[in-house]
Amino acid sequence: MMVYFMHFFKKFSVILIVVSISLLIIDRFSYSEENEILIKDVVINDKENLKYINFNQEISLDHLITKAINKGIPLVFKVTVKIVEIKDIWLTKTVLKKVGYYQIEYKALRKVYKIKDVNGNKYEYRYIDEAIQKISKVEDLEFSFINKNKNKNYELWLNVNLERKKLPKPLQVNYFDRTWNVKSNKSINKL
Amino acid sequence: MKIKLKYIITTAAFIGIALLILLAKAISNSDLISSDSFRILLGLNIIFICSLIILIAVQIFRLLQSIKKEITGSRLTLRLVLSFALMGIVPVLIVYLVSVNFLTKSIESWFDVKVESALEGGLTLGQKTIDILMSDIELKGKSIAYSIGNAEPDQRNNILTDLRAKFGIQDAVIFDQDSLIIEVSSEKNNLIPPIPNIEDLERGGRDFFGRIEEANGEQIYLKAFTPIISKNVMSKKLILQLTQPIPASIANLALSVESVYSEYQQLTYSRNSLKIIYILTLTLVLLLALLSSVAASFVISRKFSSPLAMLADATKEISKGNYKKIISEQGKDEIGVLIRSFNSMTSQLEEATKNSEKDRERLELARIFLETILAHLTTGVIVIDEKKIIRLNNVSASKMLQNKESKMNGKLMSKVILKNKIFEPLYEFINTYIVDNKKNKKEISQEFKLNKNNQERTIMLQITPLSDKKNKSYVLVIDDISEVTKAQRHSAWGEIARRLAHEIKNPLTPIQLSAERIQHKFSNKLSKEDSIILERSTNTIVNQVNALKIMVNEFAEYARPPKIQKDTIRIDSLVDEVIELYEIDKIIKIKKDKNIPIIYADQNKLRQVIINLIENSQDALKAIKKPKIKIIIKKKINEVELIVEDNGIGIPDEIIGRIFEPYVTSKKTGTGLGLAIVHKIIEEHNGKIKIERINNSGTRVIIKLKSGKK
């Protein structure tokens, strides 16, 4: 069996190499380094039995995305919060997963940038910078978690990404365009 | 398990078509296109295309291997594959390029500049209308704020209500800077107005600030904040908020234009993506079509080339002589007809070949039979043509002409015969016959006496011309009749000996008795001198009579009919037994191999042979200073060899060839019958005897007898 596979790979090694190199090239060309979100200043507040996450983001969007916003394409960002139990270096168990969304949309008629934060509050700004500044600050994202076993080690993993499924359909299925792969770093916080 | 390519291709075609249909449906269905199923479908198509590429790569690899191994039909398959693939690729590529071009242009045509300008115009119109309405509400707001600022606090409500009604404003609310409602006036009674956010109030406290708000996506409101500058400097800072809905007809149109504009802009922005999706789908279709056609071309090519390859293989087999090759029938088309004709031709060829083979076998059998006869003939047979080139000969002919090679075909008769000068008379005779008797077709025979190594051989040559219309050839039959003539001579001698013995032996006894009687009767009556003479004479008569008797007995022995009594004997024991009689001389040495096998022979006759040979040797050794007799017994394959040799005077060359004939002797007193009797006894035992000189002095007699029982 092994000999057969070795023979097969020997035969098609050239094809495999060419395919691998092509995929790498496509990946490199389609990757955009300008679109990044950097999560920082994460603060978790306890209020009664609930926890509230507050954090700031440094959102860098390239001109294509800015242009898309100005063309009226609504951008929805997904905030994913995970509480994981750390069992080992490699083993983790997700205890809780909470998802929140915030979005930015330009209203051409009124010439305003409409913001909807993670708690559903709406804001409008005349300038895009103001709007981005507003969405950069996520406040009071609520979740419920009680650490019943103090011996266990829990972490809060936080990341933000542009929700591609909420983009116009042609942009969703253009998998080769990595412009829309906007995502943050994974912020890990001890609980 | 090896699955046939055509089944793989058929299955692949169905899968490909199914995937394409699903992909086309996904493209046309906006719900599907946005879901993960589209991604899966796209992935499946790509995997399927990769599988097809691998399948084709494997097929190409195999085809190239076949070409390398020079398998029949592989080159034809390659040509057909290339032709079919080209036939598929070229039109599909053209369609693809046209489609891509058409698609790109179509998508571009959706985004007409005029449409965009119109939409932008409509949007701007809406914006301007709202701006006008906003300017209007600004003026009204400022007017109301001025009036309220100059009025007493208890009159504010009335003034607000009056002016709101006068200006046709829906809601008017006065807030203080702490967002507390001071006064409210509304078209709708009992309305509790929503508290504006602090940012808006702060901004409105500084200067006029207006904003447009949407409600439920259907209605647009104008909300204006105007600072109220009170005459009482010490009083709290107040902000007037006016809320006025834009007329529904205008609002709906404006919102509709905004929505369409937004969608158009989104579409415009997504056009590259749209192009990519459609081109990707088209490319997938192209690849599926191309690869399927290439894969199908392998199947079709093999279908076409395989019967031709089989035909080529079968032709090769037939060229090698295998006429049993039958090709399985392939349909009813021209190739099928060709195969059936080929099979029919092969069957006929096989039948003809079988018949030919049978004839050849018969001829071969006849030839082998003839060759076997010729090979086993002791008579030499040679066939020569007119140019005296040998066309056929048997082994006996080679042996007789003392030629080392058994086959002399193609050689000149002269070169074969004249190797040995003793055969010169034969060649001359043959030559003369062929030259002189070209027209004479009579057969001729001649007897030749040849002498080789002092042995006289009698050769009978018979020449028979063969009648052939085209070529003339001659059959030479060479017979060595030496043994026949010798046997005839022996027979004649035996007859003479028998008659002599009979005629001479009868009067000898009366002669001897008469001589003894004369001596007995007259010896006393005669004088002493006469008596001595009488005695000497009678003794001479008696002695001579005895000598004659011995000679007659030897003749009788030679002439006796062959009567031997065979039994299994050990020749080495027999030799030992005989040698004991000659122990006194001590000149006899014996040398024998171990485990000499027994022989089936007449012990008495063989004893006589050994005695005769030893006595012959003793006679030859009389004048020799160091006489030696050596007896050697050797074990050979199916034979026992007895050699008796001496260092005596030897046999003269003149008689050595005839030494086994009666009355041939080199001894002065011998009868010449000893070796003749030895020769006769050995022949009666089906053995062989040979006599030869040893270095011009001494004689060696070699006897070979068959070993084993009976």
Image (cartoon, rainbow, N blue to C red):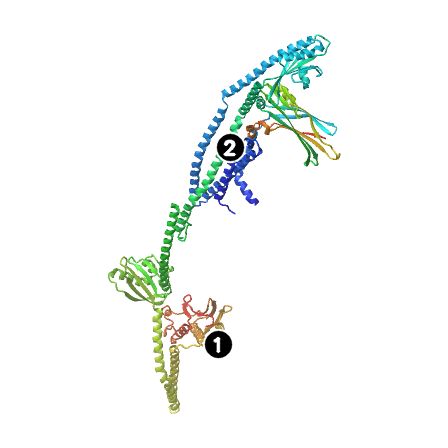
Residue B419 coordinates in the image, percent (x, y) = 34, 59
Residue B392: percent from left, percent from top: 34, 60
Numbered badge on residue B581: 1
As helix, strand or loop, the secondary structure at mark 2 comes to helix
Note whether B189 is above or below A84 in the view shown: above
The residue type indicated by label 2 comes to: Thr
- Identify the residue at image location x=68%, y=11%: B158
Q: Nearer the viewer, residue B672 or B216?
A: B216
- What is the three-letter code of the residue carrying label 1? Leu
Q: Position of residue B145 (x, y in %)?
A: 66, 11
The mark found on residue B147 in the picture is none
Write the residue at 34% across / 75% down: B492
Instruction: Name the subunit of mark 1.
Output: B
In the drawing, does residue B593 fall left or right of residue B397?
Answer: right
- Nearer to us in this view, B558 or B324: B324
Kindly identify which residue carries mark 2: B281
Marked residue nearer the N-terminal end (1 or 2): 2
Question: A156 above or below B668?
Answer: above
Label 2 crowd (10 A; few <14 / some 14-19 / many >=20): some
Q: Quadrant of residue B617?
A: bottom left
Is residue B424 in view from this perspective? yes
Q: Residues within 10 Å of mark 1 (few under 14, many from 20)?
A: few
Q: Is residue B394 visible?
A: no
In the rendered image, which quarter contains the C terminus of chain B?
Answer: bottom left
Q: Quadrant of residue B160?
A: top right
Q: CA distance from mark 1 to mark 2?
A: 124 Å
Q: Which residue of the protein is positioned furthest toward the bottom in this rendering?
A: B525
- Chain letter, disc 2 residue: B
Could you confirm whether marks 1 and 2 are on the same chain? yes
Name the one closer to the observer, A6 or B607: A6
Query: In the structure shown, which secondary structural element does the residue marked by tag 1 occupy?
Result: loop
